[in-house]
């Protein structure tokens, strides 16, 4: 890992010595990037040091996420990405579960921080995403199949129990994991996504009544249409999704139009660079991923919302594992208020809200998120 203190020295324009140059240029990176760093550091000026810092950030961005490994579980080939900070196997491993439209790479800012805190950390591309298999059968994406997938991933890795940490759809999945496979769950961390009691009627009908048929959950029920639409311009779709959050005073004017993702995509203009949450390099990672997998896997999760509701009938909804929920105060899609009453389903629950962050909290406030997660793991999970 890079030395944060040395990077701070660079940013403040202090002339680096030979040891710093050697340290920074021996790190594995593309040769052109290394040569660029050497040139800038050997002839330092404030501008060149700033350029070197930017170059170093670029190199790490493209090289600091683990390479994929492939395992088969529940008949599906999964891509997993591992950072192991617990060689002695002292603590339960952590399984990071992404949402939509995301991939394992969404945890780039968390995976090494958690490993450095003493944990074996595994992020995976869910079925239908990234480098994992992407079958088109809608039935394979209901919560019974998804939780069986994750249990199978643990078994393939010789892991008995893990802490499950999920964001967005991944958050819904990890809470469900504690309901469906409690014997495999040492703890649950929901990022933005709360666990809610089963409603009295199918959820899609509720959304349709509350937000009209333009709500994306409703529109996604139509077979094949949404994935075909988004695949017409994957770059524009990704940039539309990864926008900076709107302030709360604007929320009333954005609802319900903001939930019409297909309509917004059709009318979307090229966003300003300043409005994007992530760099072009990160955007390209997502573009490449969805060019590889298509969008049907993620959309199929939405097509199982009512099916999941049926499957939960008469099941115990209680999450008995220790739980942590972390919300974001500018998350319009999953506002902190949506977590009210979670304690009824998760008796052992701790809750926090990160200020100044929207839905993509792993990118927007990674240090705040990491600190809360590591603190909770240290107090509640570590042995």
Image (cartoon, grey):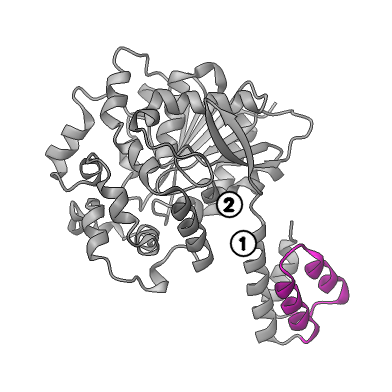
**Sequence-earlier tag: 2 or 1:** 1
Q: Check disc 2 and report the residue beneath it.
A: 108
Would residue 364 be visible to someone looking at this image?
Answer: no
- Find residue 66 and report its horizontal and vertical position in percent: 66, 49
Above or below residue 231? Residue 304 is above
* Front in this rendered view, residue 83 or 90: 83
Magenta span: 14-43
What SS does tag 2 mark? Answer: helix
Magenta stretch: includes residue 15: yes
* Front in this rendered view, residue 95 or 7: 95
**10 Å neighbourhood of mark 1: few (<14), some, or many (≥20)?**
some
**10 Å neighbourhood of mark 2: few (<14), some, or many (≥20)?**
some
Magenta stretch: includes residue 21: yes
> For residue 61, which numbered disc appears in the image?
1
Q: Name the residue rendered at 31%, 31% in the picture.
A: 304
Would residue 325 be visible to someone looking at this image?
Answer: yes
* Front in this rendered view, residue 197 or 261: 261
Left or right? Give the position of 180 relative to 113: left
Using the rendered view, name the quadrant where residue 248 is placed. bottom left
Q: Report if the CB atoms under discs 2 and 1 are less than 8 Å apart.
A: yes
Furthest toward the right, the residue is 18
What SS does tag 1 mark? Answer: helix
Above or below residue 76? Residue 68 is below
- Find residue 241 and report its horizontal and vertical position in percent: 36, 57
């Amino acid at each position: 890992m890079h030395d944060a203190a040395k990077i701070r020295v660079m940013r403040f324009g202090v002339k680096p010595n030979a040891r710093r140059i050697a340290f920074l240029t021996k790190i594995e990176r593309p040769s052109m990037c290394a040569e660029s760093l050497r040139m800038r550091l050997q002839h330092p000026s404030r501008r060149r040091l700033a350029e070197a810092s930017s170059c170093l950030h670029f190199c790490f961005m493209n090289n600091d996420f683990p390479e994929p490994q492939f395992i088969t579980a529940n008949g599906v080939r999964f891509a997993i990405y591992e950072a192991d900070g617990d060689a002695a196997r002292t603590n339960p491993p952590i399984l990071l579960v992404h949402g939509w439209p995301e991939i394992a790479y969404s945890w780039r800012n968390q995976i090494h921080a958690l490993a450095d805190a003493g944990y074996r950390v595994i992020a995976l591309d869910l079925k239908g995403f990234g480098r994992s298999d992407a079958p088109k059968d809608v039935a394979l994406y209901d919560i019974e199949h998804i939780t069986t997938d994750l249990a199978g991933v643990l078994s393939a890795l010789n892991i008995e129990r893990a802490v499950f940490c999920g964001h967005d759809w991944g958050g819904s999945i990890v809470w469900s994991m504690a309901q469906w496979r409690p014997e495999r769950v040492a703890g649950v961390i929901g990022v933005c996504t709360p666990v809610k009691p089963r409603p009295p009627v199918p959820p899609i009908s509720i959304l349709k009544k509350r937000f009209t048929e333009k709500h994306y959950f409703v529109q996604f029920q139509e077979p094949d249409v949404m994935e075909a639409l988004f695949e017409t311009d994957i770059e524009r779709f990704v940039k539309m999704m990864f926008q900076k959050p709107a302030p709360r005073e604007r929320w009333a004017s954005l609802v319900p139009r903001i939930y019409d993702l297909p309509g917004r995509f059709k009318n979307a203009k090229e966003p300003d660079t300043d409005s994007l949450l992530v760099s072009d390099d990160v955007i390209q990672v997502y573009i490449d991923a969805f060019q590889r997998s298509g969008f049907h896997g993620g959309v199929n999760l939405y097509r199982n919302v009512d099916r999941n509701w049926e499957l939960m009938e008469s099941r115990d909804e209680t999450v008995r594992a220790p739980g942590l929920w972390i919300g974001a105060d500018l998350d319009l899609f999953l506002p902190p208020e949506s977590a009210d009453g979670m304690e009824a389903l998760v008796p052992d629950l701790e809750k926090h809200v990160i200020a100044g962050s929207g839905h993509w909290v792993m990118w927007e406030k990674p240090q705040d998120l990491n600190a809360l997660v590591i603190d909770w793991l240290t107090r509640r999970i570590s042995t």
